[in-house]
Amino acid sequence: MSDWVDKSLAEQQAELERGIALARKTKPTQTQRKHGDVVICAQCLTPIPERRLELYPHSTHCVECLALLEK
């Protein structure tokens, strides 16, 4: 009995690992919104601070909106 359980668990683990690998390879679907040279938040449309863009150059949301989206 444990053989089929072990096989099932191994298949589930492999599927999970494939899904994680695919998620990591997937590029963000949203591109940065700009107003002139200023990058603005896709949610609230306020400018994203330069310091955040230095740390995370591909940011599409300000810290506050990102926190709300991740909840």
Image (cartoon, rainbow, N blue to C red):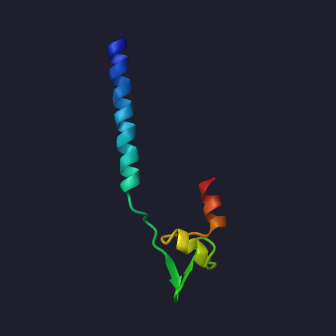
Query: Which quarter of the figure has residue 20?
Result: top left
**Residue farthest to the bottom, as pictured:** 36
10 up-or-down from 48: above or below: above
Query: Which quarter of the figure has residue 14?
Result: top left
Residue at 52%, 68% (x, y): give it. 56
Task: Please count the marks in the image.
Answer: 0
Towards the viewer: 35 or 55: 55
1 up-or-down from 14: above or below: above
Residue at 48%, 70% (x, y): give it. 58
State left or right for residue 67 relative to residue 1: right
Residue at 57%, 69% (x, y): give it. 61
Query: Which quarter of the figure has residue 43?
Result: bottom right
15 up-or-down from 68: above or below: above
Q: Is residue 48 visible in the rendered structure shown here?
A: no
State left or right for residue 35 relative to residue 25: right
**Residue farthest to the top, as pictured:** 1
Which image quarter holds the N terminus?
top left
Q: Is residue 28 visible in the rendered structure shown here?
A: yes
Residue at 39%, 62% (x, y): give it. 27
State left or right for residue 56 relative to residue 15: right
Residue 5 locus on image (x, y percent): 37, 18
Towards the viewer: 55 or 65: 55
Residue 10 locus on image (x, y percent): 35, 27
Residue 3 locus on image (x, y percent): 32, 14
